[in-house]
Image (cartoon, rainbow, N blue to C red):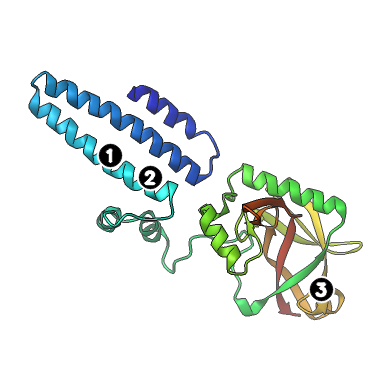
Amino acid sequence: MLSALDLINHYLGYLNVNPKLKGRIYTVLAAVGSSYILYLAYSYLSNKAYVRGSLILLAFFGILYFTAVNFFYYFTDKAPKWDVSPKIAKVLGTPQEAADEAAPAGGVQFVPSNGLYASNEVLPATLKLDPGMEAELATIASQITQSHLADDNYDGLSENQQMNLLSQGQTKVYATGDGAPLPYYRLEQDADGLAIYGGINEMSAKRLGVVTEVGLQPIADAAKKYNLYVASAVIKGGLAHVKGRAGLTEIQDPYELHVELAYKPK
């Protein structure tokens, strides 16, 4: 029985499953496993092996408790008042605390591929994309999620949590949240203007857009005054949830490339 549960758990690790769905599956598996442990405890107690049977029975109640807590967490939006897991997390430390301890001084945990810029050194860029560029952008977005470089699980939000956001005025909840950072990008002067190239890496980089404006300035005017650099490039759009008649409705938006350019006076 336990070998079968372990095998199921092993194969689940190969699947890109929504974390909440995976939590539900593990909760059901724990419930099935705890019933087998109860059977073992009963068998030992029936054969007068009271010490071993009692220990196994104690383990059963422990697993049953956490299975019940997980049921509330993964199948409802309520937390039981008798949940002691926050106290346990406080003693053992949360994954976020462990990540913070491992982070270098200053709290920087992720450095964009083109470095860091102060907010007063960058401006948003306006891009022009043709159908071919839009198709390339969609392909790269798919590669990013398939490579697990970005999550497409709606930030782990439950359906009720997404509905709350939509009820508060947000029009859409995207599967990739605030967007997927482009792993590689560069600025290049082409015959028809300043173009953004990007992709999974430099070798596979494609032409993804032509810059038409920097901030409120036409690119021709900005290029005369400043040296320009790509500060960030994020793919947004794609799969999203909107509010429907009977709950969430799934839609597919076109992908967009949001770029910020750093500038330095010539």
- What SS does tag 2 mark? helix
First-in-chain label (3 vs 2): 2
Q: Position of residue 249 (x, y in %)?
A: 66, 52
**89 vs 123, nearest the viewer:** 89
Task: Give me the disc on residue 213.
Answer: 3
Relative to 31, is 231 above or below? below
Mark closest to the chain's N terminus, 1 or 3: 1
> Closer to us: mark 1 or mark 3?
1
Q: Residue at x 69, y 49 (%)?
A: 141
Element on which disc 3 rests: strand
Task: Quote the CA–CA distance across marks 1 and 2.
Answer: 10 Å
Is label 1 in a helix, a strand or a loop? helix
| Nearer the camera: disc 3 or disc 2 | 2
Q: Position of residue 4 (x, y in %)?
A: 39, 23
| Residue that badge 2 annotates | 71
User: Would residue 90 be visible to someone looking at this image?
Assistant: yes
Which residue appears at 68% of the width and 54% of the height?
184
| Residue that label 1 marks | 64
Q: Is residue 70 left or right of residue 123?
A: left
* Residue at point 79%, 56% (across, down): 208
- The three-letter amino acid code for the residue at tag 3 is Glu
Nearest to N terminus: mark 1 or mark 2 = 1
Tell me the residue at 23%/29% (across/down): 38
Q: 3 above or below 237?
A: above
Left or right: residue 178 compared with residue 188: left
Q: Quadrant of the N terminus?
A: top left
Amino acid beneath label 1: Leu
How crowded pointer 1 is (Cα within 10 Å; few <14, some 14-19, many 20+) is rated as some
Which quadrant does the C terminus fall into? bottom right
Q: Quick one: 30 or 225, which is closer to the camera?
A: 30
Q: How far apart are labels 1 and 3 at the CA level?
A: 60 Å
